[in-house]
Image (cartoon, rainbow, N blue to C red):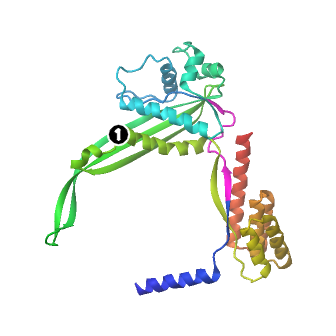
Amino acid sequence: MKRSLFGFLILSLLVFIFGCSTSIPVTVTKPAEINMSANRVIAVLDFRYPVKGKTITGKDLLEWAISKLTGLDLPDKITVEQKVAEYTTSQVISTLLNTGYFQLVSPQEVARTMQGGISSSTTAVDIGKAVKAQAIVNGELYLLETEDQEWTDERTVTDAGTGQEQIVYVPMIKRTVWVGMSYQVVNTATGNVVASRSFDSQSSTDRELEDKRNLPDVEDMYARIIDSFMPRMAKQLAPYQVREHRTLMRDKTKDPRMEQADDLVKGKIYDSALEIFLRVWRENGNIAAGFNAAILYEVTGQLDTAIEQMKDVVELTADKKAMREYNRLLTVKQEQERLREQQS
């Protein structure tokens, strides 16, 4: 214990003496996993719910979604599975719409536009022409299962009267749900599937058996898992923003100009700080100055210059941290090139 406390005090003292490196928050736009630049006007069709004994994929799944537009296959009684599938469809529409990247057409709009002209021979190409959509997104919940399992929890409690500890056994119940969801993107010019992805997850909740009535509703548990899929789906299909930090290198030379530049960075006066870092780097090869200049080039939107600057630092110093940042900058450049393609 004393050794741990001593180590903590030493670490605290070092932090106090040397301080922390200055960090710059930046908002970065990342490219989507899938290039959807040619498929930005999307018709979302109903997601299919599990039907016992019936499994369909690919083309058959799209045919099912198209036939669903007719409304002829509605069951007499609305099941939990159907409610969850309808919820999934609405969440997919909201998620894609909120990216700001797509124009969306709902299943209802598709049915209304085609005005009963939907049959077993209707194709993705037909829908694309009717609603002027470049792609169709549809899918299914291939897994919706739930299980309630009773078990016994062994607990140690203290008797309020005697103060003695004793073992008690409490009947418990665990509710577990499993959800599997898949979707596909179908290009309406060709009828070909251009992308398909799937997710699966589970969730469990415990209650004492006598409190069983307060277990969360199965439908709500399904919905929470589906909600957790949506951000992942959005990042797969549309560019997105993340908050990151760029950390400067601490100066070990005690050059007062470096401290001045660091203060300017903290005040977000990046251009002036950059001038100082470059001057110090060119005068005496101060590694922190060269490194920080490259970071500020990136922060101020001059990525190519940042790469060249960090490359110079690596070549002249062979510093491992600079090498890592150089490789990161090259990756950023590749991402930005992909992003430009997706935004064109």
Looking at the rendered structure, the secondary structure element under dot 1 is helix
Outermost residue toward the front in this view: 161
Residue 314 visible? The answer is no
**Image quadrant in which you'd find residue 53:** top left
Residue pictured at 54% horizontal, 12% vertical: 116
Residue 262 among those drawn in magenta: no
**Which quadrant of the figure contains the N terminus?**
bottom left
Q: Give the range drawn in magenta.
A: 26-42
Report the residue marked by disc 1. Answer: 218
* Residue 218: percent from left, percent from top: 35, 39
Q: Nearer the viewer, residue 205 or 289?
A: 205
Residue 38 among those drawn in magenta: yes
Residue 342 visible? The answer is yes
* Residue 10: percent from left, percent from top: 53, 85
Residue pictured at 82% horizontal, 72% vertical: 276
Q: Nearer the viewer, residue 267 or 305?
A: 267
Q: Residues within 10 Å of mark 1 (few under 14, many from 20)?
A: some
- Give the number of callouts: 1
Q: Which of 33 and 81 is in front in this view?
A: 81
Q: In this view, does 219 lie above or below 290?
A: above
> Disc 1 residue type?
Val
Residue pictured at 67% horizontal, 50% vertical: 29
Q: Which of 187 and 168 is in front in this view?
A: 168
* Residue 79: percent from left, percent from top: 36, 28
* Residue 301: percent from left, percent from top: 77, 56
Residue pictured at 79% horizontal, 58% vertical: 302
Q: In this view, does 81 lie above or below 155?
A: above
**Image quadrant in which you'd find residue 292:** bottom right
**Which quadrant of the figure contains the C terminus?**
top right
